[in-house]
Amino acid sequence: MRALTSLTLSHFRSHLRADLELDGRPVALFGNNGAGKTNVLEAVSLFSPGRGIRRASASDMARKPEALGWKLSGVLASGGQDFEVETWSEAGAARQVRIDNKASNQIALGKIARVVWLVPAMDRLWIESAEGRRRFLDRVALSFAPDHAEATLIYEKAMRERNKLLKQEIRDAVWYRAVEQQMAEAGHRIHQARVQAVDYLHQAQSNAETAFPTAELELLQTDGDMPDSAADLQAALEESRFRDLVAGRTLIGPHRTDLLGTYRAKSLPAKDCSTGEQKALLISLILANARALMEQGSGPPILLLDEVAAHLDSTRRAALYDEICALGVQAWMTGTGPELFGELGDRAQRVEVREDDGQSTLVTG
């Protein structure tokens, strides 16, 4: 089992102080819009690497108007062990992590925590820019390979340096070689992790009986094919320098990848599906991500599903809850009222989120 068994929020968003004791069952958070439900999900998302479900800066997460900083702490059950995890930011400083009272980093956090989420902002995944789809795919890849975050950071930093050289119209090859080698090595790792993630999702969808439609996924490069090796990518970067100098930016690499989705049963591109079908395809992928992690021996992830119940009829809601419980995952779900979680019965813990004078409180049922 992988689950939070306790969670404390301090000066985080609308929560001055909140404490939850949990038993590993799914968690149903309900309350009025603006009460602070999504803030709880954001807090849980920060028990994994990255900037959380909102991709917010550390300063934006601090409770206003004090802006003193914030702190999250909890006990994470993972791999048969209990880990005491703390993460915090002081007055807008970079986020820090401590595991079992020892200073740590987000990569180490990713090795014990697997958090997968679906939030309303992702509903436009199939019709927005490729950047959003790459971000989605990288979160999936990160759930399988915690060092994917490191490769991404190395690549992005090196690419910024190369783009700076291009904009300055530097033509001396010596200036490019070291940074292009970094880009090639990290870029190849990124591409391999993405390919593996897509393969895992396909396998997990093929092996499962589910009430949600299967999505066929394909990686596509904006300009030609992705080179097969780090050496080939480095050679391609070198060959592309003149073209990149004209453009003022790097035009080849994993940052030019797009993720295409197809509703398999209808052979219909996801971008052309109805809004309901697009949502169902996303849910299918999130569930497949959870199944794939279990099939690969990584254990179940923690699932965050923000306002997912509001977009499903009672039959689909019941099917979703049944699949969640069958997987044995701790899913954190939000909705405006308790009736949206009626099909769960006693299989979930219920928490009411209330808001009074700009402060959120949690009331366990």
Image (cartoon, rainbow, N blue to C red):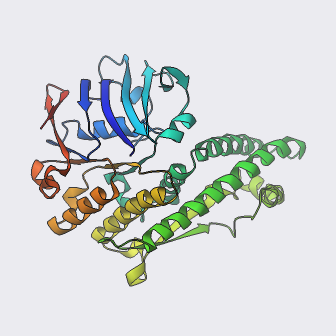
> Is 126 in front, or is 193?
193
Residue 97, given in percent of the width and then of the height, sits at 49, 26
Q: Residue at x 24, y 59 (%)?
A: 321
In front here: 6 or 167?
Answer: 6
| Depicted 80 relative to depicted 213: above or below | above
Q: Residue furthest bottom?
A: 266
Query: Left or right of 128: which side holds 8?
Result: left
Judged left or right of residue 192, residue 175 is right
Q: What residue appears at the point 40 percent right and 73 percent down from the top-left corner?
A: 214
Q: Quadrant of residue 340?
A: bottom left
Whole-percent x and y of residue 328? 33, 53
| Residue at 29% in and 36% down | 40
Given residues 45 and 153, the one toward you in this image is 45
Q: Is residue 177 left or right of residue 40?
A: right
Res 248 visible: yes
- Left or right of 254? Residue 325 is left
Q: How many marks?
A: 0
* Residue at the limit of the structure toward the front, as seen here: 80
Give me the residue at 39% from left, 42% from top.
54
* x, y percent for residue 309: 21, 57
Give residue 31's quadrant in the image: top left
> Is 48 above or below relative to 336?
above
